[in-house]
Image (cartoon, rainbow, N blue to C red):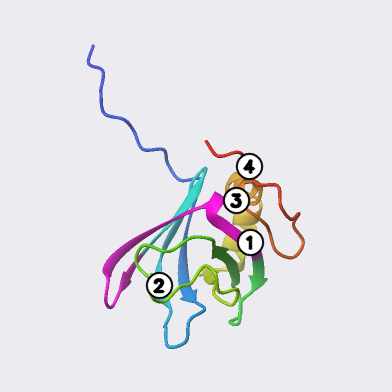
Amino acid sequence: EHVSTRLRKPSPLLLTRALLAPSLPGDSDWPGVLKFHEDHCTYYFHHPVHRKVTMVMRYRDMSGLEMRAAVGPGSAQLRFRIERTLEYFVAEYDPHNPSHHLSITLGSESDARMLQSSDAWTRMKLQCISSGAGFPRGGRAVAR
């Protein structure tokens, strides 16, 4: 019997199309794919300068997590801050500036409802440093 020695990557808990919009002046939206895992989410997109970007955002580095109604009809926006320097956008994103945040517009309201009812959302809220409106503040999970 053949046994594979390669480790399998765990499948994402949830996958959705999304649009990343940093809070920085002059930046545009970057469409991509957002995957939610047990302790992080990964956003895959194409950036005009950095080319193909894989942005890994650990829940334990997030703060101010909230779901908002998006500007456009039929969608919702996931908004949060990352409390550390970003690898690709060091000059553009300052974790010490309270006005800097990331907003990810989900593909549809049903995607937002699916996220909010998923295990990924529960894990995000538990591991996040603090949460926004309607969620308990503090309560950071122990790092693994």
The crowding category of the residue bearing disc 4, from other C-alpha atoms within 10 Å (few below 14, some 14 to 19, many at least 20), is some
Q: Amino acid at mark 1?
A: Leu
Mark closest to the chain's N terminus, 4 or 1: 1
Mark closest to the chain's N terminus, 4 or 2: 2
Q: Amino acid at mark 3?
A: Met
Residue 124 is marked as 3
Mark closest to the chain's N terminus, 1 or 2: 2
**Mark 3: secondary structure:** helix
Q: Which of the 4 image quadrants contains residue 34?
A: bottom left
Residue 7 is marked as none
From the top left corner, tell me how far across and down residue 75 is, in percent: 59, 72
Q: Which of the 4 image quadrants contains residue 135?
A: bottom right
**Mark 1: secondary structure:** strand
Residue position for label 1: 65
- What is the CA distance from the residue labelled 2 to the residue labelled 3? 22 Å
In the image, 128 versus 67, the foreground residue is 128
Q: Residue furthest front?
A: 96
Residue position for label 4: 141
Instruction: Tell me the magenta residue range.
Output: 45-66
Mark closest to the chain's N terminus, 2 or 3: 2
Q: Is residue 113 magenta?
A: no
**Mark 2: secondary structure:** strand
Mark closest to the chain's N terminus, 3 or 4: 3
Task: Check the image and report above or below for 25 versus 92.
Answer: below
Q: Amino acid at mark 4?
A: Ala
Q: Residue furthest bottom?
A: 26
From the top left corner, tell me how far across and down residue 102 is, in percent: 52, 70
The crowding category of the residue bearing disc 3, from other C-alpha atoms within 10 Å (few below 14, some 14 to 19, many at least 20), is many
The crowding category of the residue bearing disc 2, from other C-alpha atoms within 10 Å (few below 14, some 14 to 19, many at least 20), is some
Q: Is residue 71 left or right of residue 30?
A: right
Mark closest to the chain's N terminus, 1 or 3: 1
**Contact, CB < 8 Å: mark 2 with mark 3?**
no
